[in-house]
Image (tube, rainbow, N blue to C red):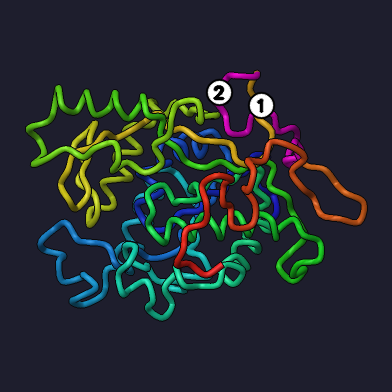
Amino acid sequence: MKDLPARRLLLVHAHPDDESITNGATMALYAAAGVHVTLVTCTLGEEGEVIPAGLAHLAPDRDDRLGPYRAGELAEAMKELGVTDHRFLGGQGRFRDSGMMGVPQNHREGAFWGTDVDEAAAPLVEIIRSVRPQVLVTYDPRGGYGHPDHIQAHRVAMRAADLAGERAYRRDLGDPHAVAKIYWTRVPRSLAEEGFARLRATAAGDFPGIAGIADIPGVVDDERITAEIDGAAYADRKAAAMRAHATQIAVREPFFALSNDLGQPLFTTECYELAVGVSGAAPGEREHDLFAGITGTTGSTGVAEAAGGSPRSAAGRIPGASAGGVREGVGEISGGAV
């Protein structure tokens, strides 16, 4: 792609709605700042539950038309966030939602969970080499909460980032490009605790029940957080994007519920852990800009050119955060094709 803005951000998510819940404020903030924001969604979310009774016929055990409907919801959410570059991995419907871990849908033909990682990574490599993002955002190795499609999205994103920089890999997919920084989406434990305390104090009666911290994807101890984005100015945009996913989310600001109708906080401070690259913050401090430390327009910070080799991150890689992205001490998660 030609004539793109100097700063380019790529996010890789599993299903429609994941992006708005997890990174909606970040996406709106950067889009408003003129950053080229690209969202890649890996499936249509065909196996999701349906909240509105009038749309129950879309469910996979009835008409099985939820996927295309959710694609429409995602398009509306992108309008709310100001994001104009959204793609489905491999094209709309190429990979199917695998359902929750351990269900028969995990093994359905075309399920994302069972797809070879390199096969799924190839179309993402083409996007990376075309858009040439300096920053990539995706899930941690457990996909935040263990959903097979989230785990697979992590694996595919990390593998594609590696392959995109390999000079010998698929030159038909474009010129090699090294992503300078890769972040995993996180929620600091203190932020989750504060959010639930506020919910219990002010809105407990608005929901049949209240979720727990264990229900929130990506919660980690605060010291794991390396970047914090203040999205308060875009709270309305994030909430509007979440409302666009009406089959999946019921928003009651500043809280929301999924199909289980358990209240949880709607976070407008969005946090990240730097998995690959070099932090632009002072030692011991958090970044407040995902592009911090990246110079110029090519994303050169943290990238070294080996003679005759491919661009690589020179420093700052979490141990094991490469092909497959399994973090040292976390271990592999069985069941997916690697």
Q: Residue at x 64, y 43 (%)?
A: 319
Residue at mark 1 to residue at mark 2: CA–CA distance? 9 Å
Position in image of residue 293 (x %, y %): 69, 29
* Residue 85 shows up from this direction: no
Which percent across, then down, holds residue 320?
Answer: 63, 48
Label 1: how many Cα within 10 Å (few below 14, some 14–19, many 20+): some
Q: Residue at x 35, y 37 (%)?
A: 237
Is 299 one of the magenta-colored residues?
yes
Indicate the secondary structure of the residue bearing disc 2: loop
- Quarter of the rendering occupied by the N terminus: bottom right
**Where does label 1 land, which residue?**
280
Dot 1 or dot 2, earlier in sequence: 1
* Relative image position of residue 61 (x, y in whole percent): 20, 75
Q: Is residue 204 left or right of residue 189?
A: left
Give the residue number, with chain letter if any, for mark 2. Answer: 286
Which sits in the foreground, 294 or 73?
294
Residue 229 lies in magenta, yes or no?
Answer: no
Q: Nearer the viewer, residue 319 or 241?
A: 319
- Residue 54 higher or lower than 187, as above or below: below
Residue at left 60%, top 54%?
158
Q: In which quarter of the view is residue 200 placed? A: top left
